[in-house]
């Protein structure tokens, strides 16, 4: 069940960079608010809200800030009605991109995403042309200090499908419906969990072995990540070891 995903490693490192840029809190709060609006404000009966609530806590969002977001979602406080949109596109090297957004203005978001793709060597794609290459999965990231065999023993009994070494953390993959119970089981076994979420995982990867193409692609993803409406960018890229070393 072990393996290594270079894209997951990049995403892990970019996540830390996003937090430093100060944009992560606003995006997480928006996700909490939408989850509460769609499924109610009880984390025990709304697994999506529980996942988003925990994701916000994992990233040090203050509890009172999260609770206000839940109340905006349930209508107890005035809030904005955000719409969920997934844009599909291609980046440099033919890499597929799924761009998940939450927006209160569909026209603005669509125009922004199209412009960012166009300015950074990408293009918008027809709906369905990229998404079929991805499956939504639950992911739980745990401290790298735990042994893989120990992690596997606990994980296999609670829905774990794969374990990847991201260098600083292990990433355990499962079905989206199992992500909360898997996290609970790992924490009950004394495993330090750093993050849990759901994500779109590529079935097949596009290998990039040109450093220039890789840099252009990462610049595109950075530009998309910096957009306030964009919540996440998923890709099927596999950057070669040689290029990874050059980019390090």
Image (cartoon, helix red, strand yellow):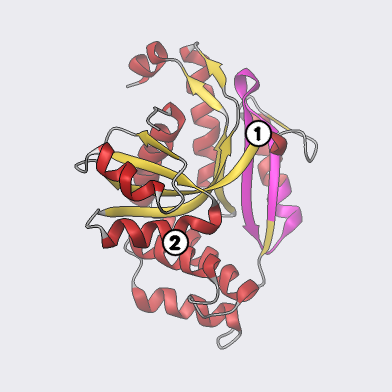
Residues 123 and 172: in front is 172
The answer to whether residue 80 is seen in the rendering is no
Q: Residue furthest left?
A: 145
Q: Are marks 1 and 2 in contact (CB under 8 Å)?
A: no
Q: Is residue 7 above or below residue 180?
A: above
Q: Is residue 224 above or below residue 216?
A: below
Query: Could you say which quadrant of the image residue 56 lies in?
Result: bottom left
What residue is disc 1 on? 117
Is 147 in the magenta?
A: no
The tag earlier along the polypeptide, 1 or 2, is 1
The kind of secondary structure element at disc 2 is helix
Categorize mark 2 by other alpha carbons within 10 Å: few (<14), some (14-19), many (20+): many
Q: Residue 150 in the image: state x and y as whole percent.
A: 25, 43
What residue is disc 2 on? 180
Q: Residue 19 in the image: state x and y as whole percent.
A: 36, 51
- Residue under the image location 36 percent in, 53 percent down: 195
């Amino acid at each position: 069940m072990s393996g290594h995903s270079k894209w997951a490693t990049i995403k892990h490192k970019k996540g830390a960079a996003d937090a430093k840029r100060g944009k992560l809190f606003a995006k997480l709060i928006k996700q909490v608010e939408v989850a509460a609006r769609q499924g109610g404000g009880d984390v025990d009966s709304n697994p999506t809200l529980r996942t988003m609530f925990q994701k916000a806590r994992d990233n040090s969002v203050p509890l009172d800030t999260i609770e206000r977001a839940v109340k905006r979602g349930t209508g107890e406080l005035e809030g904005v009605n955000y719409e969920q949109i997934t844009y599909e596109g291609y980046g440099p090297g033919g890499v597929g991109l799924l761009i998940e957004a939450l927006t209160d203005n569909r026209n603005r978001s669509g125009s922004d995403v199209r412009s960012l793709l166009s300015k950074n060597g990408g293009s918008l794609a027809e709906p369905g042309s990229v998404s079929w290459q991805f499956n939504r999965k639950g992911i739980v990231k745990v401290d790298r200090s735990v042994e893989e065999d120990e992690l596997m023993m606990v994980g296999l009994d609670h829905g774990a499908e794969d374990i990847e070494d991201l260098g600083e953390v292990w990433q355990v993959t499962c079905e989206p419906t199992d992500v909360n119970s898997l996290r609970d089981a790992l924490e009950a076994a004394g495993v330090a969990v750093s993050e849990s979420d759901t994500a779109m995982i590529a079935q097949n990867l596009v290998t990039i072995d040109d450093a220039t193409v890789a840099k252009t692609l990462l610049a595109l993803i950075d530009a998309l990540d910096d957009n306030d409406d964009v919540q996440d960018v998923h890709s099927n890229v596999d950057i070669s070891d040689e290029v990874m070393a050059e980019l390090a």
